[in-house]
Image (tube, rainbow, N blue to C red):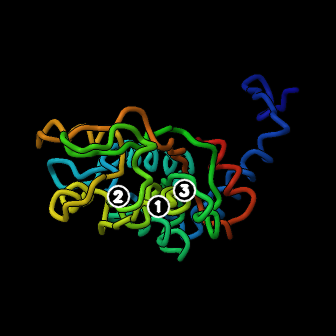
Amino acid sequence: PWRRTGEGAGATRRQHRPGLPRLRAWHHRCMIELAPTGTLRATINLGNALLARRGADGAPTGVSVDLAQALAQRLGVPLALVVVDTAAAAVEAVREGRADVGFFAIDPKRNDGIAFTKPYLLIEGSYLVRADSPLQHNDDVDRPGVRVVAGQGSAYDLFLSRTLRHATIERAPSTPKVVPQFLASGADVAAGIRQALQAEAERLGGLRLLPGRFMVIEQAMGCRAAYGEAARAALAAFV
């Protein structure tokens, strides 16, 4: 249908869309629920260099930053980055209401206080050992006396804490510090992102990855679980 916008010979017509007010109302509700302060606060974890890191100018850059900027633009609100160094800190920032959204590996222990989208990226978790290590396969790791270093509160830490029965987990303060602690402490295995561990093996020498992977990380976005249905639906649609 058409609605007249004027009278006489100069009158014009525009198309009337009955659903447009409803769509605008839904968009406004999404904006209010997902960014209740009027600014989208997105936590960025610099501990996973695949997703975020500091650029030459010191500012955060990477996939997570790009996604946060795109989401803020879609909502029509400013963006504020809450930059942290670990996944655990990113989780707490959203749970405690210091950030509205974040980028996380899906894990049952993180379901409390966070509503996740479906994954937008799959990341392989691998083991790094010394070149002369007797460990040859992933199944060799879970043995008495084997020491495995993982980043405190990382997806690898959470997963291995549930699945390793005999090996001992030693926790580094953050994911970037896993390999240095592994080397300095004389531990047997470093657990982490395959690409990052491969890069360290090539840079340092005398190290190798065990074949395959010990887990697959489902990387997703998440918002505070206390936010309403519109916020969760908007985030899910965005991803």
> Residue 138: where, in percent of width, then height?
42, 41
Give the quarter of the figure containing the N terminus: top right
SS state under label 2: loop
Quarter of the view holding residue 97: bottom right
> Residue 111: where, in percent of width, then height?
64, 63
SS state under label 3: helix
Q: Which residue is mark 3?
A: 163
Please name the amino acid that badge 3 sits on: Thr
> Any mark on residue 166, and which?
1
Disc 3/disc 1 C-alpha distance (Å): 9 Å
Picture residue at 34% right of the left edge, 67% below the top:
171
Disc 2/disc 1 C-alpha distance (Å): 8 Å
Q: Residues within 10 Å of mark 3 (few under 14, many from 20)?
A: few
The earlier-in-sequence mark between 2 and 3 is 2
Please name the amino acid that badge 2 sits on: Val
> Any mark on residue 146, and which?
2
